[in-house]
Image: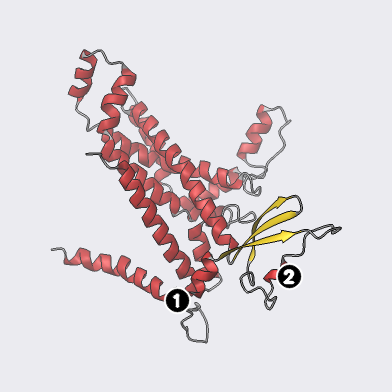
């Protein structure tokens, strides 16, 4: 009876993982007349390799020595060769330069976890708040449930295109702010500014996905026996105490499901980035998944893209295990 499920799991999970693992140790390209050859851990050295360069300003010099003198091929400094600047820290006549084989990967990793750190609690909390609001026997309450759920059934590609127009300098948001401020508002290119591009995508993603988790929270709320609330009311509990002592503990299974699904969706962010910003501006919205797809398919570096996917798989697995351990019921 379990044979079909085992076959599907092997076909769509086990086989891709094994292929990614094997390709990550080669220089395989998507379209190349040369056959793939093993390169050992070279892809992982490029991906995870980080070096620290300490520079000192010479007496009377106006600036520090060029970093290029250390990173160019044949410079005589093998630890720094073919690396790029990730960030620098200046302290008087001293400068600390952090070099990475792939700075974009570290930026995309930061963006991915920052996105998850904001979206997971905001989307989960807002979904719970909406579920509490619509979990009432009022006339017309189903209309509000439908309105809140409508963005979920809309394709993410369509939603991303619509919000890209909304975020334009002459889009809806700037027009509304200009009207409210009587014309004193200077139009902002929300997706063209490195400081606002990622928060703008966060806002759109929360708006699009909150309806789904509202329904999940609502299903959990409706499984709580009314007798528990009646007993709490007899004991003199107010609405806040009922939520803290009755509702929240009874929502534990729902809470685990919601947090895990939001986290996995947030860490796998791709569609919004691909449609709205293509990773820009200045890699401010590049995510790990988008970086892996760009390297593997657009730049045809399949071996390196597989290495990125494999490292990210291990990171997501670790995050999921930690989150599950934190959310599990204490004995």
In the foreground, 181 or 67: 67
* Residue closest to the far right: 60
Residue 169: in sight, yes or no? yes
Q: Residue furthest left?
A: 1
- Check residue 69 in the rendering and tell me which mark sits there, or answer none: 2
| Residue 177, image x, y percentages | 65, 32
Q: Quadrant of the C terminus?
A: top left
Give whichever of 208, 51 is nearer the camera: 51
Residue at x-position 72% and y-position 68%? 68
- Marks 2, 1: nearer the viewer: 2
The colour style of the image is secondary structure
Q: Position of residue 313 (x, y in %)?
A: 40, 61
Cβ atoms under marks 2 and 1 closer than 8 Å: no
Identify the secondary structure beneath mark 1.
loop
Quarter of the image with the N terminus in it:
bottom left
Q: Secondary structure at mark 2?
A: helix
Who's the residue at 23% across and 15% down the image? 233
- As displayed, is residue 68 above or below residue 327? below
What is the crowding at mark 2: few (fewer than 14 residues within 10 Å), some, or many (at least 20)? some
Q: x and y percent of residue 150 in the render?
A: 41, 40
Position of 219 relative to 153 (above/below): above
**Horizontal side of residue 124 vs 294, given as left or right:** left
Compared with 136, 235 (above or below) is above
Front residue of 271/179: it is: 271
In the rendered image, which residue does mark 1 sit on?
A: 25
Q: Is residue 139 left or right of residue 285?
A: left
Residue 210 in picture, x, y percent from top left? 41, 39
Residue 15 vertical placement versus 94 (above, below)? below
- Residue projecting furthest to the front: 59
Question: What is the spatial separation of the Cα atoms under label 2 and label 1, in whole angstroms?
Answer: 30 Å
The quadrant in which residue 83 appears is: bottom right
- Name the residue located 61 percent from the left edge and 70 percent from the top edge: 79
């Amino acid at each position: 009876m379990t044979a079909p499920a085992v076959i599907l799991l092997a076909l769509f999970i086990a086989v891709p993982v094994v292929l990614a693992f094997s390709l990550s140790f080669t220089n395989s390209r998507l379209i190349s007349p040369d056959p793939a050859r093993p390169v050992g851990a070279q892809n992982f050295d490029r991906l995870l390799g980080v070096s620290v360069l300490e520079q000192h300003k010479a007496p009377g010099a106006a600036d520090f020595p060029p970093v290029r003198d250390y990173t160019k091929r044949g410079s005589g400094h093998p630890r720094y060769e073919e690396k790029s600047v990730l960030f620098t820290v200046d302290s008087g006549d001293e400068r600390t330069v952090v070099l990475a084989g792939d700075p974009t990967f570290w930026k995309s990793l930061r963006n991915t976890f920052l996105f998850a750190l904001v979206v997971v609690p905001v989307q989960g909390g807002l979904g719970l708040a909406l579920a509490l609001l619509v979990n009432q026997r009022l006339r017309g309450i189903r209309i509000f449930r439908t309105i809140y759920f409508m963005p979920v059934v809309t394709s993410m590609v369509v939603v991303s295109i619509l919000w890209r127009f909304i975020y334009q300098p002459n889009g809806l948001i700037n027009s509304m702010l200009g009207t409210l401020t009587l014309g004193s508002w200077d139009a902002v290119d929300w997706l063209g500014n490195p400081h606002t591009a990622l928060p703008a995508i966060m806002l759109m993603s929360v708006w699009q996905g909150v309806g789904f988790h509202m329904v999940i929270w609502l299903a959990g709320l409706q499984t709580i026996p009314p007798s528990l609330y009646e007993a709490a009311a007899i004991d003199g509990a107010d609405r806040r105490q009922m939520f803290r002592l009755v509702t929240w503990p009874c929502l534990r299974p729902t809470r685990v499901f919601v947090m895990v699904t939001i986290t996995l969706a947030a860490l796998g962010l791709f569609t919004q980035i691909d449609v709205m910003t293509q990773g820009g501006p200045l890699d401010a919205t590049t995510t790990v998944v988008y970086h892996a797809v760009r390297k593997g398919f657009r730049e045809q570096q399949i071996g390196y893209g597989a290495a990125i996917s494999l490292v990210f798989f291990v990171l997501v697995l670790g995050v999921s295990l930690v989150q599950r351990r934190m959310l599990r019921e204490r004995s």
